[in-house]
Every structure is written in C-alpha cells, then in structure tokens.
C-alpha cells in the first residue's frame, strides 16, 4: 500500500472531525439565540371589559420544583375605563383582588385602588423530575380569578392572563384550559379557566449538555487507545503519560459539575456516563502501569563509589620527604 494512502485517510478524518465541530458549534449558537422567550397566548388590545394580567416567569427552580414569577396588571378593564393604552399604568377605581392557586404562601393578591400598581412576586408550585436532566419538564396548572372587592358579595371580573418575559436556558410556554377548574360562588358551582405553564430546557442547553457528555466519553477512549497501544509494544513507554491519565481522571468531576442546570448527584447521567468514564479511566491507567512493568527494563546499575584512600602509607607517602 502506498505511504500516501494512510496519510490521505488521516487527513480526511481530521477534516471530517473539524467539519463536525463547526456544525455542532453553529447548531449550539443558533439554538441559544432563539431560546429563552416565554410564548403562548398572544396579548391583544385592552377591550375595556377584561382585566389583563401579565405573568412573567423569572427563573425555573428545578431542584425545588418552583417557578418564581411576577404578576402585573396591564389593564383593569371596567375598573379603569379611561386607561386603555398598554403603556399606561392603570389606576383602579376599586380594589382588585386576585385568587391564585398552586403558589407558596398566601394565595390572595390585592391591588389597592387609587394607586399606581406595582408588580407582585410569587412562587408557583411546579411538578417535574430533575433526575431526568436535561429532558426534565416542569408544569404549573394554576387558576387565577379576579374579584372586585366592594361592599357586599365580591363581584367576579372577566380576566385575561398573558405570559411574557425571557428566561435564559429555558423554553416556557403558557396555554389556557377553558374548563380547568371550578369554584364555588353564591350562584353555585362555576367553571373557570386554568392557566398552564410548561417549562423545559431549551435546545441550546440540551445540546450543550450532550456535547459536554460526549467530550467526557472521549477522554477514556483516548486513554485506552494510548494504554493498549503501549501494552502491545507498538509505542515506547513513557512514564510521564501516567500524569496525563491522572489529570484526565481528576478532570471528570469538574466537568460533571459544569453541566448546565446542575443535575443532582444520582441523576441518570451519573449511572450511564460519569461512573463508566471514571471506571474506564482507571482501567486505562492500570493497563498503562502493566505496560510500564512489562516493557520498561531495570535501570542502569549504579556506578561504584570511588574508593577512599586507605592511608597515606598505602599510597607510598609517609609524610614530608626527609632530607638526605
């Protein structure tokens, strides 16, 4: 076989590897650029009838199964008929009370009348399993009911809820279920809409995690290739490679903690990837030690120490020469 054939194959392999890395880089960057926006129901213009409420998720607390968010009244509907522009802060003529389910703490939020309304922070309780990272999904099904608090029985107001905001690393969608819950009123049982928030990790986060796991798998593969090649006697044993293999072993845990979203210890990645990466690195190091014992001969024998002068008499010098 001509010597140029292996060279061409090696060059094609290198070019193919570089092209694959470039494609992965472009895919990850594009996914990152298009991720993070909260989507779902599109907000329309105020109609003077419905209270319009913006729900803006701030982040996703995957470990605690919580989604912190802010509530902001964009239009008070019949409570502020003179302020129908979205860029105008509503000032309500009567107190507005919201009943919000599936949240931590108090589930009643009150917006006082005759004041500029400020956003209110709360934490929605979500359901999901972080152990299946990065394919974990978190869902919140909340019911928000608006009331006008006046003398006598509270008056329920028509309400529209809209998702908004940007959460890096997550894709969040919000939908409404027409018959999601029921409430008890003076008129009996009444059906109300439920607001469903669904959060899953963005494509960029998933791609980032998969690429990082692939790089972790590549480490023991390289170590085993070097170790087996040296054991077969096809390459020279160099003790310095043991330090390189040890560095690979100690680099595994920092790479594990660098995974986006910090999956907890005991996630599926530990059982299917991390554990076997560490095991393969240990095996590669053991094979290389065996190769070192097999092919490394004993070192040169130490040279004998220079013999000490026995005595002045043995050298023929008994002191200063006596005068004849």
Image: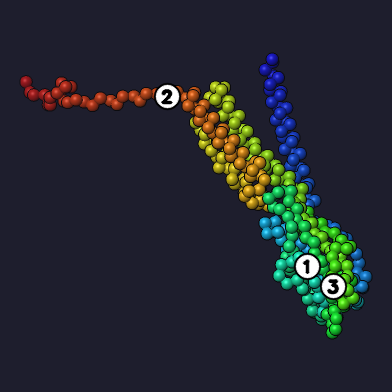
- Mark 3 lies on a secondary structure that is strand
Residue 130 in the image: state x and y as whole percent: 69, 52
Nearer to us of marks 2 and 1 is 1
For mark 2, what is the residue?
Answer: 298
Numbered mark located on residue 184 in the image = 3
Residue at x-position 58% and y-position 37%: 279
Left or right? Give the position of 299 relative to 180: left
- Mark 1 lies on a secondary structure that is loop
Residue nearer the viewer, 184 or 6: 184
Nearer to us of marks 2 and 3 is 3
Q: Residue furthest front?
A: 188
Residue 105 in the image: state x and y as whole percent: 71, 70
Q: Residue furthest top?
A: 1
Residue 93 in the image: state x and y as whole percent: 85, 81
Residue nearer the viewer, 293 or 168: 293
Residue nearer the viewer, 7 or 63: 63
For mark 1, what is the residue?
Answer: 101
């Amino acid at each position: 076989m001509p010597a140029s054939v292996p060279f061409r194959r090696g060059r094609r392999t290198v070019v193919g590897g570089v092209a694959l890395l470039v494609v992965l880089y472009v895919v990850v960057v594009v996914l990152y650029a298009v991720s993070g926006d909260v989507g779902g129901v599109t907000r329309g213009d105020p109609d003077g009838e419905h209270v319009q409420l913006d729900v803006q998720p701030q982040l996703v607390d995957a470990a605690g199964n919580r989604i912190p968010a802010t509530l902001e009244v964009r239009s008070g509907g019949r409570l502020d008929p003179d302020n129908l522009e979205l860029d105008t802060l509503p000032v309500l003529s009567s107190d507005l009370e919201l009943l919000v389910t599936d949240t931590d703490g108090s589930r009643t939020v009150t917006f006082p009348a005759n004041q500029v309304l400020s956003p209110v922070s709360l934490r929605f309780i979500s359901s999901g399993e972080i152990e299946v990272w990065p394919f974990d999904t978190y869902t919140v099904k909340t019911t928000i009911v608006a009331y006008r608090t006046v003398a006598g029985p509270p008056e329920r107001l028509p309400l529209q809820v809209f998702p908004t905001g940007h959460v890096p690393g997550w894709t969040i969608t919000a939908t409404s279920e027409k018959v999601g819950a029921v409430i008890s009123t003076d008129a009996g049982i009444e059906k109300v809409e439920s607001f469903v928030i669904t959060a899953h990790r963005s494509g960029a986060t998933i791609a980032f995690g998969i690429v990082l796991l692939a790089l972790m798998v590549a480490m023991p593969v390289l170590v085993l290739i070097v170790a087996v090649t040296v054991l077969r006697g096809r390459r020279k044993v160099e003790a310095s490679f043991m330090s390189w293999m040890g560095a690979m072993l100690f680099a595994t845990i920092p790479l594990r903690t660098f995974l986006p979203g910090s999956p907890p210890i005991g996630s599926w990645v530990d059982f299917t990837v991390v554990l076997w990466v560490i095991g393969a690195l240990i095996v590669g190091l053991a094979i290389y030690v065996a190769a070192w014992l097999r092919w490394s001969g004993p070192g040169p024998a130490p040279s004998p120490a220079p013999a000490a002068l026995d005595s002045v008499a043995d050298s023929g010098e008994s002191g200063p020469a006596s005068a004849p």
